[in-house]
Image (cartoon, rainbow, N blue to C red):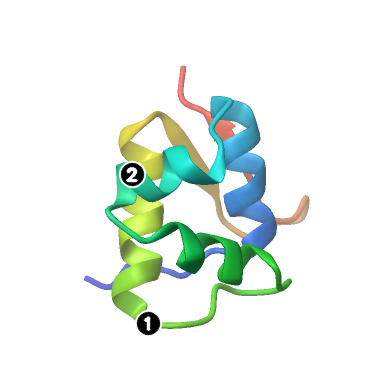
Amino acid sequence: MSIRKVSIRQIKAARALLGWTQDDLAAAAAVSIPTIKRLESKDGAIGGRDETATKLRTALELAGIEFIEEDSGGVGVRLRA
């Protein structure tokens, strides 16, 4: 099963909910800091390699983030209860 890519806004919102810096996310996802900075400098869906998007989403989910799929209220993120 493939993991759906999330948007850059969702990544930034998830970091904010966790109180994480770009450095924190880079360490948790085993991705370089320049990669995080490059990805977050854009808007829209995460660009780059699928492997990188998967690492970011997985790291945030393991930290307690739940990604909200598109519905009548739009996409988003929240902390799991």
Can see residue 40?
Answer: yes
Upstream in sequence: badge 2 or badge 1: 2
Report whether 7 appears left or right of 5: right
> In which image quadrant can residue 77 be found?
top right
Q: Residue furthest left?
A: 1
Residue flagged by tag 2: what amino acid is it?
Answer: Ala
Let me know if residue 7 appears in the view: no
Specify few, some or many for label 1: CA neighbours under 10 Å numbering under 14, 14-19, or 20 or more: few
Which quadrant of the rendered structure holds the N terminus? bottom left
**Measuring 70% from the left and 68% from the top, which residue is drawn there?**
41
CA–CA distance in space, label 2 to label 1: 18 Å
Give the answer, above or below, for where 67 lies relative to 79: below
Residue at image mark 1: 49
Q: Residue at x 47, y 70 (%)?
A: 5
Viewer-closest of 51 and 21:
21
- Secondary structure of the residue carrying tag 2 is helix
**Mark 2 crowdedness (10 Å alpha carbons): few <14, some 14-19, many ≥20:** few
Q: Which mark is residue 21?
A: none
- Which residue is labeled 2 in the image? 27
